[in-house]
Amino acid sequence: MSYRSAIAKNIRELRFVMCQQSPASMGARQFIAKNYLDIKSQAPATPFIVRECHGAQPNVMVRYDFGVEKRVYLNELTADEVDQAVGELVLDADSVNAAVPGQ
């Protein structure tokens, strides 16, 4: 969970898409329920968006500097595995942001 302090500094947006009922989205739903307030308190200005749509394939998208985006699909993952996936996306921010031309 050490990645959470880096969200405000390195991430422009954190967006989750999931189904409200499907078993494939259960881990994503649990992650949101457990961690939304903590992440939002550490990065209040960073958009943390949750979109629910019946039958949607669960995924998390992170927007870095200059509109660069990365998406990870979260099918059948546990809340801990979702946490790990989000952490990896956040920790990738330094290398992604540094690779953007013009910086």
Image (cartoon, grey):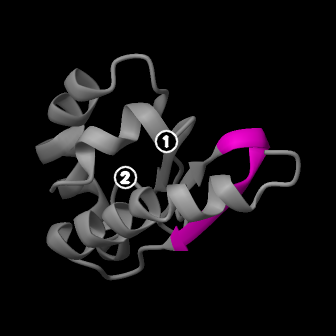
Q: Nearer the viewer, mark 1 or mark 2?
A: 1
Residue 90: x, y in percent?
A: 42, 56
Please name the residue shown 31% across and 61% down the image. 28
Kind of residue at badge 2? Gln
Horizontal relation, residue 84 to residue 7: left or right: left
| Label at residue 65 | none
In this view, which residue lies farthest toward the top?
Answer: 45
Label 1 and label 2: CA atoms lie apart by: 29 Å
Please name the residue shown 23% across and 76% down the image. 81
Q: Residues within 10 Å of mark 1 (few under 14, many from 20)?
A: some
Region of the chain picked out in magenta, as a range: 65-72
| Label at residue 20 | 2
Q: Residues within 10 Å of mark 2 (few under 14, many from 20)?
A: some
Identify the residue under disc 1. 10
Of residues 72 and 56, the one drawn nearer to the viewer in this rendering: 72
- State which quarter of the image contains the C terminus: top right
Horizontal relation, residue 96 to residue 88: left or right: right
The answer to whether residue 91 is visible is yes
